[in-house]
Amino acid sequence: MDYQKILEEIYQEIQPFAKEGKQADYIPALARINPDQFGMCLLTVNGDEYNIKDFDTRFSIQSISKVLSLALCLSIEGKKLWERVGKEPSGAAFNSLIQLELENGIPRNPFINAGNIVVADVLMSRLKDPEKRFIEFIRALANDETIDYNLEVASSEREKSYLNAAIVNLLKYHNNIENDIEDVLSFYFKMCSVEMNCQQLARTFLAFADHQKKFEYADVYLTSSRVKRINSLMQTCGFYDEAGEFSFLVGLPGKSGVGGGIVAIHPKLYSVAVWSPRLNAKGNSIMGMKALELLTTKTEESIF
């Protein structure tokens, strides 16, 4: 398969969408970035790499980090986590208060804001230094010690965090938060602020695609069964209330973030990351979604 040629074709074919949407301007630090950028990187389980355009430009991975915090949390908490957060698609906006209230403070899944705030709370309760452990885990996955939090982005999110503050207070009211509210929010925003480029992100998620290799990174161990379940959650819950559309069009497990990044995996074949800051109304990268749709169409490779 000539993946490099396919990536180049994809870039040309998505140009009609280049000016659609806008970046996540409700986060001041993200509102300042140039929205007209595009990068893509595909890594195979055999070690081959294919990339195009701004693949080496770092961006805030935002909600993509929720997959990684879930992996860390499951390695520590195991199935007990599912007593505090569900495994079902939300069918609602990622920051919905209404759904959380109706379901008595149990978030639908760990990839919406409420669910990942609970994951952050668990990590704070179980780890002596959760911020250090989380970033060490990501660095080990990517084999890159330069990956770090962007404190400017984290602070910027905190400034405008009225809805997330309401969510964590509602969780606390329903006894689903153990730690101090401000501390939980601070850790949550730091996890979302992690910066990577497409190459680093694809390498990080190769661990979820390469089933031939044991999942052991920075003292984080996951069974193949747990990796499979994380991939399943990416398939059903990875794109807010657009998860069904992504599955329908692309046919791969994946996760998006409002920084414009999307990562997807084809188990036993490859990991692919794409970044373009302009988002649709659901909070997903317009050019990123289209690029991945074209990738699986042109390669005729999906999990279905």
Image (spheres, grey):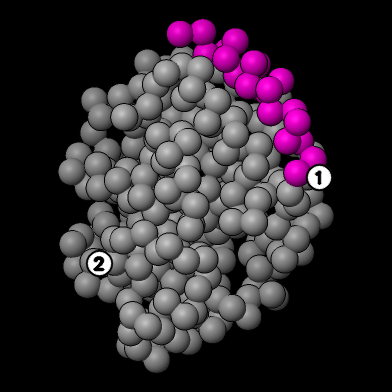
Q: Residue at x 78, y 57 (%)?
A: 31
- In the picture, the quarter occupied by the N terminus is top left
Q: Earlier in the sequence, mark 2 or mark 1?
A: 1
Rendered residue at 63%/76% (across/down): 161
Mark 2 residue crowding within 10 angstroms, few (<14) / some (14–19) / many (20+): some
Residue found farthest to the bottom: 173
Residue at (75, 44) in percent of width and height: 20
Taking the image as drawn, is residue 109 in sight?
yes
Location of residue 97 with respect to 298 vertically, above or below: below
User: What is the magenta segment's predominant secondary structure?
Assistant: helix
The answer to whether any part of residue 117 appears in the image is: no
Q: Position of residue 125 (x, y in %)?
A: 33, 74
In the foreground, 38 or 104:
104
Which residue is nearer to you in this view: 178 or 278?
Answer: 278
Residue range in magenta is: 1-20
In the picture, the disc for residue 196 is none
Q: Which mark is residue 34?
A: 1
Alpha carbons under labels 2 and 1: distance apart: 39 Å
Q: Is residue 8 magenta?
A: yes
Provide the residue designation for mark 2: 81
Q: Residues within 10 Å of mark 1 (few under 14, many from 20)?
A: few
The amino acid sitting under disc 2 is: Leu
Nearer the observer, 246 or 257: 246
